[in-house]
Amino acid sequence: MSLVPGRQFANTEDPAHVAQYLIRYAGLGEDALQAIAELRAREELRFSEAALRLGLVTQADVDAALGASRNLESGRPARAQADAQLVVAHDPFHPHSEQIRVLRTAVLMRQGEAAANVLAVVSSQRGEGRSRLAAELAISCAQLNQPTLLVDADMRNPGLHPLFGLDNARGLANALAETAPPQLHGVNGLPQLSLLTAGRAAGNPLELLSSDALDALLVGWRRRYRHIVFDTPAVASYSDALAVANHAGAALPLARLHRTPTRDWKTLIQRLHSTRARVLGGVLNRI
């Protein structure tokens, strides 16, 4: 590849690793790099600015790259550790792990050939097993050796951070409210899985989750991840999950045996049908 000679960019360089991150996760090929080099030769632009100007990356891509660079400079975010109750992460031969794989296969077949499978796990009430199902489904997707992102969109009663031994100081709420790069956590033993905790919402979570900021994040995430799984709040109490399902485009409803009333299940399905999300069957939790 021949780059444009001449002008040096010493005063217009991105922080370390930003260009490498964008090249890798936005899939910038030789033609794109040549176009960026030519534009930078004409104007004093950073690599990221030139890529944005040319429409080769999104602002969400750049934010993620800047966040990754800051993490490298200041120390990476704490790595997560899957709790023992997330059986699929620890015992692939357990019957429960096989049930999760069967569910994963059914969900992926119903989602078709989309570039990225985005899914919101939803249920009517608290205590129905929503967070565990979202976590184990994401773990199972990552075990396909495909990049997977697990997002806790339950800012009311977040449940993913204790399942992975993390605090909840910063997360999705901060990324949406501050338009800051989200702080993603790697997971020990699962190199293809990333986790975004809920964070602490200063404002109304429904407004945050209904905003264009989540759409902007999803644009970048769809480039980088094959599977994106959202945990959500209880639908009977809040409309947050419906907003997330709208963004995701697909929902997997969950009920718990001997706990979820039939009327609540019917109401849940009716409310999901009022969104743009496809309902991908349903799960009955017997645990």
Image: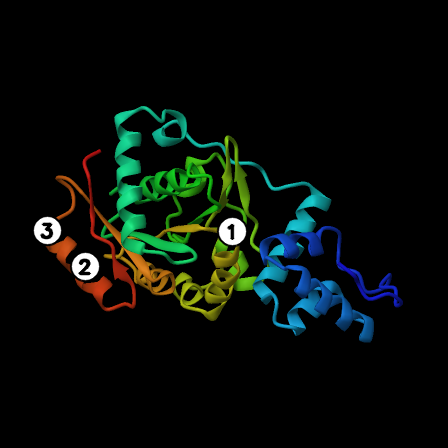
> What is the CA distance from the residue labelled 3 to the residue labelled 1?
34 Å
Q: Name which residue type carries label 2.
A: Ile
Q: Name which residue type carries label 3.
A: Thr
Whole-percent x and y of residue 215? 46, 66
Earlier-in-chain disc, 2 versus 3? 3
Q: Mark 1 and mark 3 in contact (Cβ < 8 Å)?
A: no
Residue 285 in the figure: left or right of residue 50: left
The N terminus, quarter of image = bottom right
Q: Mark 3 and mark 2 in contact (Cβ < 8 Å)?
A: no
SS of the residue under disc 1: loop
- Indicate which disc residue 171 carries: 1
Q: Which residue is mark 3?
A: 262
- Foreground tag (2 vs 3): 2
The C terminus, quarter of image = top left
Whole-percent x and y of residue 207? 41, 67
Q: Which residue is mark 2?
A: 269
